[in-house]
Image (cartoon, rainbow, N blue to C red):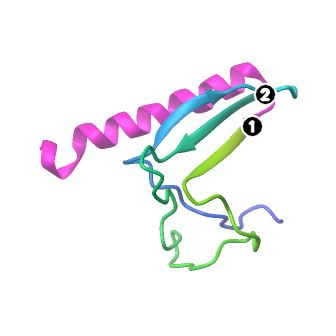
Amino acid sequence: MQSGHWVGTIVLNSAKLIERPSKKDGFCFKIYHPLDQTIWAQKGPKGETYGAITQPLMYSSAIFRAPSEAAGNISQLIISACVFIYTQNAPGNL
């Protein structure tokens, strides 16, 4: 897969994030929907309907691995901040 190809867009407004134990080096975390619904948007940022990966992705979760615990903690913090900011600025909260 080449750099710059869209793989998929995760809808974070209903997703949860947890650290996931891993036997491999690095840091692992999981984004999932608590009610087992899809976490994926139907279209990409440019209207794409299929991502660069052709095999099916997990429906209600995605697992991410960072090369180090520091990088994983930063990634997890940024995603958590995005979810928090969205929920504070959602149309029902304005």
Q: Which residues are magenta?
A: 66-94
SS at mark 2 in the image: loop
Q: Nearer the viewer, residue 22 or 25?
A: 22
- Residue 22 is labelled as 2
The verdict on residue 83 being magenta is: yes
- Would you say residue 79 sits in the magenta stretch? yes
Return the residue nearer the eye: 33 or 68.
Answer: 33
Query: Is the residue under label 2 in contact with that under label 1 (CB below 8 Å)?
Result: yes
- In which quadrant will I find the N terminus? bottom right
Dot 1 or dot 2: first in sequence order is 2
- Please identify the dominant SS of the magenta region: helix
Q: Which residue is mark 1?
A: 65
Q: Seen from this angle, which residue lies furthest right?
A: 24
Residue drawn at point x = 67 percent, y = 64 percent: 7
Left or right: 41 as drawn, with respect to 25: left
Answer with the quarter of the image where residue 26 lies.
top right
Q: Amino acid at mark 2?
A: Ser
Residue 69: quarter of image:
top right
- Residue 43 image offset from top left, x and y in percent: 50, 73
Q: Residue at x 54, y 54 (%)?
A: 60
Give the answer, above or below, for where 80 lies relative to 70: below
**Drawn side of residue 34 relative to residue 69, left or right:** left
Q: Say few, some or many: other residues with alpha carbon within 10 Å of mark 1 (under 14 / 14 to 19 / 20 or more).
A: some
Task: From the top left corner, tell me how far across and down residue 53 is, in percent.
Answer: 75, 69
Q: Position of residue 8 (x, y in %)?
A: 60, 63
